[in-house]
Image (cartoon, grey):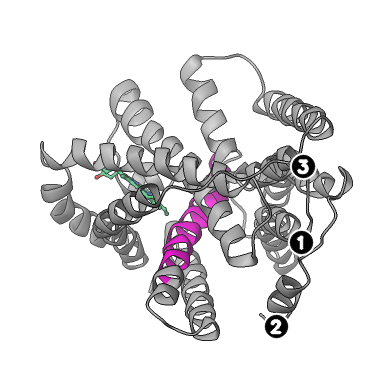
Amino acid sequence: MGAIVKADRMRSGDVVVGVTPAIAPVVGAVSYPFLLVIFHQIVGRSGNPLSTLQVIAASVVLASTAAIPAVAIWTVYRCNLPTALRRLCYFTVVAPTLYVFLGVLLTLAGANISDLVVWVGVWLLLAGIAVIAGRSEESVVPGKIPTWLRVAHGISAAILCAYILFHLANHLVGLRGPAAHAQVMAAGRSIYRASIIEPLLVMMLLFQVATGLQLAWRWSASRQDFFRTFQIASGVYLAIFILCHMNSVFVYARLVRGIQTDWTFATGSAPGLLRDPWNIRLVPHYAIGVFFVLSHLASGARIVALSHGLVRLGANRLWLFGATLSAAIAIAILSGMCGVRV
Ligand code: HEM
């Protein structure tokens, strides 16, 4: 925390740096699915128990997928990149959820092409566009962010909190087993699947994505302090996560496949999340999704606390507590989904 505050003080008079700092986030995003392949090679398909060494190696590889968004956030925060490259780095944060989205879209399209080929192609294209745009860029003057947009985004988030907190609590109950999870879900469905509520919920989430992306676009026109950088990055991840998640639940599962969107669906059916080469991508996608949705709310709470007169140090500590709790909840939910029981 001290390093972040110190670096924030050193920001005035920064010169715009070149392409080099953006290389690490882009390489991270490109290599993301290859980390999953390595994970699967270690865990194997045999179903035999793993040795301690294999468990440690697999955990390190899986945990390193979380380093990809972290490196991107740190790069955007520390380096005064040209705007196009800053935005590209923000976008690399979404790699874990974009890879799920890509996989589902290719399945829906019945495309006979490897996810890996499309993945590498997409990132090379995006990087090429950003480098060219960054070179010819005039200095971008950030437009004023309309107050109504921030207020509308905040109010709608506060309302959506009711569903999101219930939903995540429901997944936490998975630590007690599938039956307990199903019982809580059945109670919740009687409300959130009601014919008036469900379309409203989806519309509000789409509104959240649209307003969030507008805010992120405007804020990302210039370099921000650490907390704002984190808020923008987590928001961009959530925008893609929500679109991907809605597509998986409503289009892929319910509309096209006609399958129940229950515990079995969420945990990767018979092969489970960890041993299946496709399903493994759901682990970072969900874990980082849960972490970012809760820590994004903590970022919003920090701004509200500051505007109500809380001293900066107190507000920063509040955020740190929120982010730590978010990580603990994400790990607990995913542990339950991978078979841990309490
Ligand atoms: C571990 C993380 C998560 C898992 C495993 C998960 C899984 C699921 C499942 C299985 C459903 C279908 C529910 C049903 O049929 O009743 C669902 C629906 C939904 N999820 Fe999630 N979810 C996760 C995180 C999130 C997050 C972070 C958000 C919000 C940002 C979210 C938003 C929604 C919404 C809006 C629906 C549609 C509700 C409806 O059926 O009307 N989920 N999710």
> Tag 2, which secondary structure?
helix
Q: Does residue 340 appear in this view?
A: no
Residue toward you, 339 or 122: 122
In the picture, residue 280 is in which quadrant? top right
**From the viewer's perspective, is residue 93 above or below residue 7?**
above
How far apart are the two marked residues, 3 and 2, measured between alpha carbons?
28 Å
Residue toward you, 9 or 285: 9
Residue toward you, 265 or 244: 244
Return the residue at label 3.
Answer: 26
Q: Amino acid at mark 3?
A: Val
> Tag 3, which secondary structure?
helix
In the picture, residue 8 is in which quadrant? bottom right
Q: Is mark 1 within 8 Å of ligand 1?
A: no
- Residue 108 on image: x %, y %: 46, 20
Give yes or no for residue 280 being in the magenta stretch: yes
**Left or right placement of residue 241 versus residue 195 in this view:** right
- Residue 116 on image: x %, y %: 70, 29
- Which region is colored magenta? 278-301
Residue toward you, 316 or 58: 316
Q: Assign the C terminus to one quadrant of the image.
A: bottom left
Residue at 20% in and 35% down? 199
Which circle, 3 or 2, is nearer the viewer? Answer: 2
Q: Does residue 257 appear in this view?
A: yes
